[in-house]
Amino acid sequence: MQNSPSPEELHAFDREHFLHPWHDMNAWRGYDNMLVEAAQGIYLYDETGRKFIDGPGGMWCVQIGYGQAEMAEAIAAQVLKMPYASPFTNVTQPGAILAKKLADFAPGDLNNVFFTTGGSTAVDTALRAMQFMNNSLGRPEKKMILAREKGYHGSTYLAASVSGKERDVTKFDMESRLVHFLPNVNPYLRPDEMSVAQWCDAKVQDLEEAIAQLGAENIGAFIAEPILSSGGVIVPPEGYHKRTFDICRAHDILYISDEVVTGFGRLGHWFSSQAVFDIEPDIITCAKGLTSGYLPLGACIISDRMMERMTHRGEVLFSNGYTYSGHPVSCAAALKNIEILERDNVLAHVRDIAPYFQERLARLTRYPIIGDARGAGLIGCIEARLSKDGSRLEDERKIGAMIDQACHDRGLIVRPLINMCVFSPPLVISRTQVNDLFDILGQAIETVCEKFD
Ligand code: PLP
């Protein structure tokens, strides 16, 4: 029997052959990345058995934590019973039951579920559905998409085109003629003399001005994450969602709420659009927490109102589909994940513990290098700021990586983003573990502060 490769060999295979998402591979190849060998609860273990709190919860996705044996059993049972059936021609038990569940969880008349392979393909599906609808309605010019700076919606061509992070829009060719970006909504960036309420007015006005400039007759959709997560956990000012939603409705612009991160309990509810932000979008996209990351799956949930308008000469023909739409094994994993979230009252636990998590997070601004600590539910971000006058210093750009390293040395993983670190731990995190996470983070920041004295 062949011996398993050693950790050194695995690192070499990886360095030489594995292209990692969103990485400068030259930098990756020069850096000693962690080899994850095992995972249990909220912890990851490296090849030496060293334990780390998984601050990012995988990639904002491992809601129920690692090592849930029931998930393995449900997945294995579905593989043995029927691992695949074409979604183009068949009904399956896990697919049908999951579609019904999602329709029940989604607000209002969002009753029509198109399964995808993840978040990017869910967003692509949503945008293509908008295009299809407007073509069907005989208004092919109504196709532009309003998106926001710092938004992230995925890495397929159309989803990347509506993502407003600098690296997305400057390094690739995008469908830029279809997309208009609204300026950053981050309240932290408002001028000193401006209140949050005035900032909200200004951000709503950005939307109104864009509509006036482009013409509502040319705009098909507004796409927005309830909280801009990968862009640095930007929580728009209170009232922003409802006001922008009402404006879109008034102009017959579809509102697409991208809940790939905020869905499945991250903010204490199945979906946050209505429960937290009081809006009933035309489309919700979701992925990640839908299966807690145990298997890939996404969904684009479309309202009845929109489906009625997608009819072309009496037929709803929507040429969009994936070999793995509604994959039975992924759907079985999602159903078991939902069963665990329901049975263990995980959403109520999030609603219960989130205020304490946010309180501990807010306390981090006591460190001189931390300009802002913000979040919602079980999502957090710290943003470093060194200058007193608000201008960016070159050193600031390294702080995320420095805090990340100091956390790693103490047994905590965070996700560095230039001058920020973000985290979104598994939802099953206990109060003691929340204390562990923030104690380590505080110590790590203190060490980095010393370097800037
Ligand atoms: N939408 C949002 C809000 C996301 O955060 C992400 C990924 O982080 C995506 C879409 C893309 O999802 P995926 O990576 O599953 O394609």
Image (cartoon, helix red, strand yellow):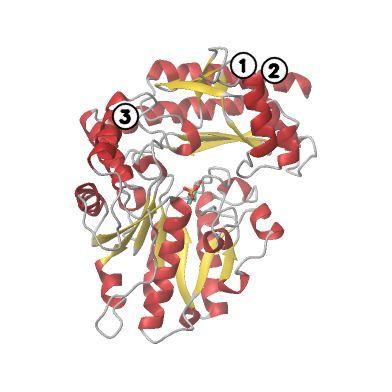
Give the residue displayed 40% in from the left and 59% down from the top.
322
Badge count: 3
Q: Which residue is mark 3?
A: 72
Tell me the quarter of the picture where residue 288 sits. Answer: top left
Q: Which residue is mark 1?
A: 443
- Where does residue 83 sit, x and y in percent of width and height? 29, 44
Work out whether mark 3 precedes mark 1 in sequence or the reverse, and give the earlier one: 3
Q: Which residue is mark 2?
A: 447
Q: Is residue 13 visible?
A: yes
Number of other residues with Cα within 10 Å of mark 2, as a class: few under 14, some 14 to 19, many 20 or more: some
The front one of 186 and 286 is 286
Q: Amino acid at mark 2?
A: Thr
> Does residue 36 appear to the left or right of 418 in the view shown?
left
The front one of 187 and 434 is 434
Q: Amino acid at mark 3?
A: Ala
Number of other residues with Cα within 10 Å of mark 3, as a class: few under 14, some 14 to 19, many 20 or more: few
Give the Cα distance between marks 3 and 1: 37 Å
- Where does residue 92 sit, x and y in percent of width and height? 21, 52
Q: Secondary structure at mark 2?
A: helix
> Does residue 418 appear to the left or right of 222 in the view shown?
right
Question: Decide: marks 1, 2 in contact (CB < 8 A)?
Answer: yes
In the image, residue 404 sits, relative to residue 197, either above or below, namely: above
Q: Is residue 453 visible?
A: no
Give the residue displayed 39% in from the left and 31% down from the top.
354
Which of pointers 3 and 1 indicates the residue nearer the eye? 3
Tell me the quarter of the picture where residue 446 sits. Answer: top right
Give the Cα distance between marks 1 and 2: 6 Å
Q: Quadrant of the C terminus?
A: top right
Q: Amino acid at mark 1?
A: Gln
Q: Secondary structure at mark 3?
A: helix
Number of other residues with Cα within 10 Å of mark 1, as a class: few under 14, some 14 to 19, many 20 or more: some
Work out whether mark 2 precedes mark 3 in sequence or the reverse, and give the earlier one: 3
